[in-house]
Image: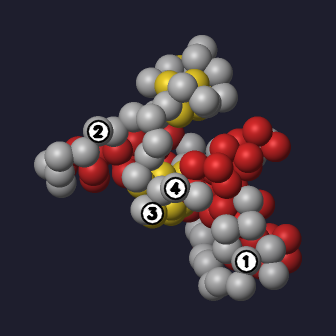
């Protein structure tokens, strides 16, 4: 969802912190989100090590799960927005923890990731 990318981006920008924001995607040609083409700053494997990872709602693939696991191992914070929590759970990052998501996905999320 576009708002899952744009909302956190704007929040971090508005905070006026001395941080470098950037996007990472599987391919340099980017992704199409609801008809809007997003071209990432980096393709996976080319990005600097992130300190903070914000995972938007997105399709999760074996490659994206592997990237989240690898990048999170050295990040200070990894968080998700809305149903991006599915990717964190699929990566095993929520094992033994409580988590929540958008109210429309409560039941599905609890069923898949008890």
Query: Which colour assignment does the render follow?
Result: secondary structure
What numbered label is drawn on residue 74? 4
Q: Nearer the viewer, residue 50 or 62?
A: 50
> Could you tell me which residue is drawn at 57 percent across and 56 percent down?
72
Instruction: Measure the C-alpha gap from mark 2 to mark 4.
Output: 17 Å
Distance from disc 3 to disc 2, alpha carbons, whole Å, reads: 15 Å
Residue drawn 64% across and 21% down?
Answer: 27
Q: Is residue 3 visible?
A: no
Kindly check if marks 3 and 2 are in contact, taking CB atoms under 8 A apart as contact: no
SS for callout 2:
loop
Mark found first going from the N terminus, 4 or 1: 4
Quarter of the image where the C terminus is located: bottom right
Query: Is the Cβ of the residue at disc 4 closer than 8 Å to that at disc 1?
Result: no
Looking at the image, is mark 3 or mark 2 earlier in the sequence?
2
Task: Please rate how many residues cluster around mark 3, counting C-alpha atoms within 10 Å: few if below 14, some from 14 to 19, many from 20.
Answer: few
Residue at which label 1 appears: 95
Kind of element beneath mark 3 = strand
Q: How many marks?
A: 4
Q: Cβ–Cβ below 8 Å for labels 4 and 3? A: no
**Which mark's residue is nearer the viewer, 4 or 3?**
4
User: Which residue sits at x=74%, y=67%?
Assistant: 92
Give the residue number, with chain letter if any, for mark 2: 20
Local crowd size for mark 4, using a 10 Å CA cut-off: few (<14), some (14–19), many (≥20)? few
Position of residue 56 measured from the top left corner of the image (x, y, whole percent)? 55, 49
Sequence-wise, the earlier of marks 2 and 4 is 2
């Amino acid at each position: 969802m576009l708002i899952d990318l744009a909302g956190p981006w704007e929040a971090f920008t508005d905070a006026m912190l001395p941080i470098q924001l950037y996007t990472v995607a599987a391919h340099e040609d980017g992704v199409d989100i609801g008809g809007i083409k997003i071209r990432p700053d980096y393709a996976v494997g080319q990005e600097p090590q992130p300190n903070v990872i914000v995972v938007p709602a997105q399709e999760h693939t074996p490659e994206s799960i592997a990237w989240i696991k690898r990048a999170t191992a050295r990040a200070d914070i990894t968080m998700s927005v809305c149903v991006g929590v599915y990717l964190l759970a699929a990566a095993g990052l929520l094992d033994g923890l409580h988590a929540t998501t958008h109210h429309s996905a409560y039941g599905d999320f609890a069923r898949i990731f008890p």
